[in-house]
Image (cartoon, rainbow, N blue to C red):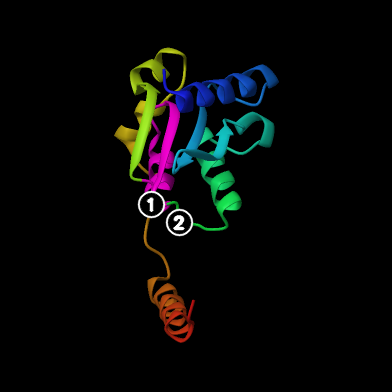
Amino acid sequence: MSIYMQTAIEEARTGIHAGHGGPFGCVIVKDGEIVGRGHNEVIRQQDPTCHGEVMAIRNACRNLGTFDLTGCELYTTAAPCPMCAGAILWANIRKVYYGCTIADTDAIGFRDQVFYEQGCADSEELCRSECQELFREYSEIQDKQTY
């Protein structure tokens, strides 16, 4: 068994025994070193975005001092949900290893499948021109900044 997946499993186990949330643990690895870790803390934080992958991404970003996790790999106990998959893409993580499938997650009472079928909540466009102006302001500021 992969040492990194074993660590993700241990992270999840810590979380479930502490009552933090579901059996979802995650580690992020760069150049053979664990740079981030997290487990589901939805219950503990009273925040539906505190999935294991999101917590590990936040931890890795803090530890590395960056929002760009290019070159990192992610190990997680279950296939990422759409929210986590989005966070993984935004973080520039290109390789994900997972243990359980969406069907396995469904079998223990989590409803990930609905998010693949349903998508976003009912939505409609509102105040587009005002928001476009905001986007223009942002672009002008970005053009003047150097990093």
Residue 129's label in the rendered image is: none
Q: 140 or 64, which lies in front?
A: 64
The single residue placed furthest to the front in the displayed view is: 32
**Dot 1 corresponds to which residue?**
92
Asked whether residue 74 appears in the rendered view, the answer is yes
Q: Is residue 52 left or right of residue 83?
A: right
**Dot 2 corresponds to which residue?**
68
Mark 1 residue element: loop
Q: Tell me the quadrant of the picture where the N terminus can be found.
A: top left
| Residue type marked 2 | Asp
Question: Residue 81 location in percent, x, y?
Answer: 40, 34
User: Is residue 79 rendered magenta in the image?
Assistant: yes
- Compared to 121, does 90 lie above or below? below
User: Is residue 94 rendered magenta in the image?
Assistant: no
Asked whether residue 121 appears in the rendered view, the answer is no
The single residue placed furthest to the left in the displayed view is: 117
Q: Residues within 10 Å of mark 1 (few under 14, many from 20)?
A: some
Mark 2 residue element: loop
Question: Residue 106 location in percent, x, y?
Answer: 40, 18
- Compared to 74, does 22 lie above or below? above
Question: Residue 64 location in percent, x, y?
Answer: 56, 53
- Tell me the quarter of the picture where residue 15 sits: top right
Point out the tag, 1 or 2, that comes first from the N-terminus: 2
Instruction: Name the residue rendered at 66%, 17% in the picture.
Output: 17
The single residue placed furthest to the top in the displayed view is: 107
Contact, mark 1 vs mark 2 (Cβ under 8 Å): yes
Q: CA distance from mark 1 to mark 2?
A: 6 Å
- Compared to 93, does 42 lie above or below? above
Query: Which portion, as a residue range, is magenta?
Result: 70-93
Callout count: 2
